[in-house]
Amino acid sequence: MPCLGVKTEEFRRALKPVLARVPLPRAAAWRRSCLGLFRKATYRDEWWAAAALAGDRRAREFQTMDALPMYEEMIVTAAWWDVVDDLATHRLSEILRREPAAMKRTMRAWSRDANL
């Protein structure tokens, strides 16, 4: 997937006011917004924007096992460090802290999956 090549700091600065205008009233709406942006992406930068929206501070309470199918789709589809590292390090770790037993079971299942 092509990349626009915007430098990280410029990207974050430009993205911040845009994400602030995205309403996040409920978890389901947040997941729809994240996946809508992710699925319609034609540039890697749009995947990064979807990952940033997933990590929006207003969505902190939405970081539960219910969000896991969304993250799995994003990780499997993107399948490259620039998207996966952010999601795994920051989003999945939050779910692991909140719901350790369920997340550990999922992580064990993923570790045996043919698609690492």
Image (cartoon, grey):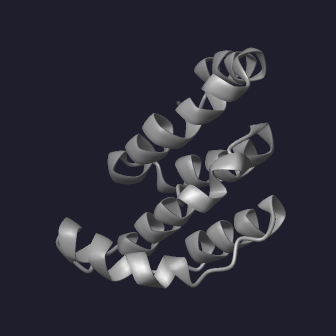
x, y percent for residue 47? 46, 67
Residue for point 69% across, 27% down: 98
Q: Residue at the location (57% across, 47% down)? A: 76
Q: Where in the figure is residue 112, as x and y percent of width and height? A: 64, 17
Query: Which of the 4 image quadrants contains residue 48?
Result: bottom left
Q: Can the viewer see residue 41 in this picture? A: no
Query: Residue 104: percent from the left, percent from the top?
Result: 68, 16
Identify the residue at image location x=64%, y=57%: 59
The picture quadrant where one finds residue 111 is top right
Q: Is residue 47 left or right of residue 97?
A: left
- Name the spot of residue 3 as percent of width and height, x first: 28, 74
Q: Nearer the viewer, residue 7 or 2?
A: 7
| Residue 10 vertical placement versus 75 (above, below) | below
Is residue 108 visible in the rendered image? The answer is yes
Q: Is residue 78 above or below residue 13?
A: above
In this picture, residue 23 sits left or right of residue 80: right
Frontmost residue, 108 versus 103: 103
In this picture, residue 9 sits left or right of residue 81: left
